[in-house]
Image (tube, rainbow, N blue to C red):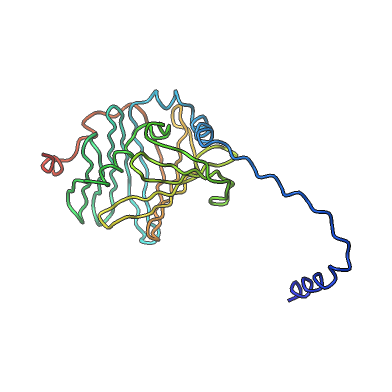
């Protein structure tokens, strides 16, 4: 109420006061180019050469869903040339849930749905997500644009629009101070339809010659899940580690 009265009084007395000299509008802050921001992130991770020096990776950790009281081990295996990936989560009371890409086929296996091959948009998005060198955002596949300087999870960040050649657009947030990626917003197709996922990345630690986020909190449809990585090793993955299970091989024609 007091602020309202003061404002009215200011209007009443304004004609009796000499007008204050106009202040120049503050100059708009020049935003850095998106490639410059991504390159700072790459440098903070260890550098482009360090990223390209590796051909495979295995990460181990824990996946937890606080709302459901669920927690279990998670393993992610990736390799390049061709790009392949396997994600395995073991959920107590439910069983193993697997997601994979063998360079051509994307697939999933879970106790709820059984073995399934991904097709259409799901196949395309898995192919992009399985890119072993995705951190580099190859200009042949991605167009980047700095949108604004904003606050993400309490930190000043640059917001970047990440447009893929297939028309999908994601959003990345990079910490202004450290240069490291702080999180992202991505839209993905699923058997239940299109879903938007917000991910927050933090707890960066060095494994070998590269930094890696060890805490990733993802929120999808109001459900939050946290991945905590405990180990990351490079170039020890064998081809058989990425083989689809027999139930998926039976579906591949």
Image-based side of 232 in relation to 124, left or right: right
Q: How many marks?
A: 0
Q: Is residue 217 left or right of residue 166?
A: right
Residue in view at x 17 percent, y 40 percent: 245
Question: Quick check: 149 left or right of 216?
Answer: right
Between 38 and 31, the residue placed more toward the observer is 31
The x and y percentages for residue 212 are 45, 36
Rendered image quadrant of residue 236: top left
Residue 230 drawn at (x, y percent)? 41, 40
Residue 253 in the image: state x and y as whole percent.
10, 39
Where is residue 184? Give x, y as percent. 45, 47
The structure residue drawn at horizontal position 25% and vertical position 57%, both measured from the top left corner, is: 93
Comparing 170 with 213, the one in front is 170
Of 218 and 60, which appears nearest the observer?
218
Above or below, 206 against 174 in this view is above
Q: Quadrant of the N terminus?
A: bottom right
């Amino acid at each position: 109420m007091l602020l309202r009265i003061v404002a009215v009084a200011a209007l009443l007395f304004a004609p009796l006061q000499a007008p204050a000299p106009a202040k120049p509008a503050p100059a708009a802050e020049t935003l850095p180019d998106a490639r410059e921001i991504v390159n700072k992130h790459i440098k903070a991770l260890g550098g482009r050469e360090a990223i390209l020096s590796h051909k495979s990776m295995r990460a181990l950790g824990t996946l937890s869903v606080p709302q459901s009281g669920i927690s279990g081990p998670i393993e992610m295996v990736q390799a390049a040339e061709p790009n392949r990936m396997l994600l395995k989560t073991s959920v107590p009371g439910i069983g193993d849930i697997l997601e994979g890409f063998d360079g051509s086929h994307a697939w999933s296996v879970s106790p709820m749905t059984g073995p399934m091959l991904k097709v259409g948009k799901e196949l395309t998005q898995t192919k992009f997500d399985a890119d072993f060198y995705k951190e580099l955002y190859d200009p042949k596949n991605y167009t980047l644009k700095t949108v604004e300087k904003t606050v993400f999870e309490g930190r000043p960040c640059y917001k970047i629009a990440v447009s893929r050649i297939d028309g999908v657009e994601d959003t990345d947030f990079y910490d202004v101070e450290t240069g490291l990626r702080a999180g992202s917003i991505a839209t993905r197709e699923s058997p239940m339809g299109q879903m938007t996922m917000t991910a927050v990345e933090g707890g960066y630690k060095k494994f070998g010659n590269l930094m890696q986020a060890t805490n990733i909190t993802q929120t999808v449809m109001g459900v939050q899940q946290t991945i905590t990585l405990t180990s990351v090793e490079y170039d020890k993955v064998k081809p058989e580690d990425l083989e689809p299970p027999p139930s998926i091989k039976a579906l591949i024609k």
